[in-house]
Image (cartoon, grey):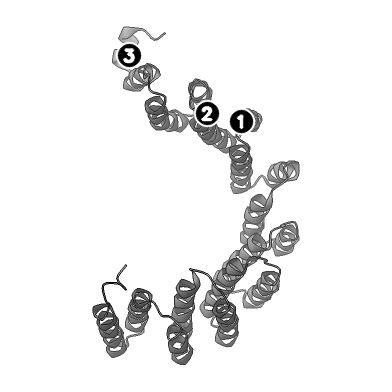
Amino acid sequence: MLKVDELKQNILKAATHLATKIRSTEGQADAFKQLVPIYLQRNEVDFAASLADTLNDPFTRDQLLMEIAERCASINDDDYALQLAEAIEDDSINLQALERIAVRKISLGQVDKALQIADSIEHSDNIYSELAVYLTQQGALSDAKEITQRIYLPTIKAATQLQMAIILLEQSQMEDASSLIDEALQTSLEIDYKIDEIKTLIEIGNTLIRAEMLDKAIKTLDRARQETIRLDDTTKETLLSVISISFLESGNIELADETLDLINDKTTIASTLSSFANIFWKKNQQDEAIDSLTEAFQILKSQTNSEIR
């Protein structure tokens, strides 16, 4: 028990003392969520952990233990970090904690420790993804590519390959970047869930636009469009809107307009035209920008009460 004089001299200790007296489980959890990060900033991880462990709310307790474990990893108290992760009861939070510890080790350049954690858990795709990106940043591209082969889910694998390609583009390594984009395209064929495949194709298309590989970008976006047209899903028109905007970014106004014509929802059409206006404005095509905004306004104005949402 803290003494009264000590509480008067230390506002944090006083706040902590009051928090321990809160009877409401939810109220105490909210208070602890504010206090624990302050103790972590001071590297008082032992006290933070003991505080979290007194909570009656198991979810908040596990969340706080995860944050403390990550902080321990950042100050190289790895054994304690893993011990705290093991104390987490919820399986999904336990996995998140181990991932965070591994990612923190990667950020510190401690690749071997990250790999040890990745090899010890069943679902380690996120760790391998972070590691591949890190190795690419460090110039170890062949090692990074080897790591991507350990990624099981094609959605994560393709996203990782794309992140690596973007890093290489920023480093003006165009040939290697192009090769990785091709690998991401190949990986996208393995994605089972059609919407995820389409979203991946759009991301690849946008990266190709950034790399000024416009012919390949248009071909990729057209593949995304054809897959989207076949969808019977509520997200269909939203995806068509994104694809239409990407076509315009690539400079292909004809395909942008053709894709826009496939959209029926007036709000989505107006939103897409508003994005068109932004693109035209950035390209110093002010007349086209104003025309797009005018058309968007007219479409919204034409909505009936039943069409407004």
Mark 2 crowdedness (10 Å alpha carbons): few <14, some 14-19, many ≥20: some
Q: Which residue is mark 1?
A: 89
Marks 2 & 1, CB-CB < 8 Å contact: yes
Mark 1 crowdedness (10 Å alpha carbons): few <14, some 14-19, many ≥20: few
Q: Residue furthest bottom?
A: 254
> Which part of the image, by quadrant, shows the N terminus?
top left
Callout 3, which amino acid?
A: Leu
Query: Residue 277, position in %: x, y?
Result: 33, 81
Indicate whether 235 appears above or below 74.
below
Tell me which label, 2 or 1, sits earlier in the chain.
Answer: 2
Number of the label disc, if any, that sits on residue 58: 2
- Give the Cα separation between the discs numbered 3 and 1: 33 Å
Query: Residue 254, position in %: x, y?
Result: 46, 92
Tell me which label, 3 or 1, sits earlier in the chain.
Answer: 3
Mark 3 crowdedness (10 Å alpha carbons): few <14, some 14-19, many ≥20: some
Q: Which residue is mark 3?
A: 7
Dividing the picture into quadrants, the one containing residue 165 is bottom right
> Which part of the image, by quadrant, shows the C terminus?
bottom left
The local secondary structure at tag 1 comes to loop
Callout 1, which amino acid?
A: Glu
- Give the Cα separation between the discs numbered 2 and 1: 8 Å
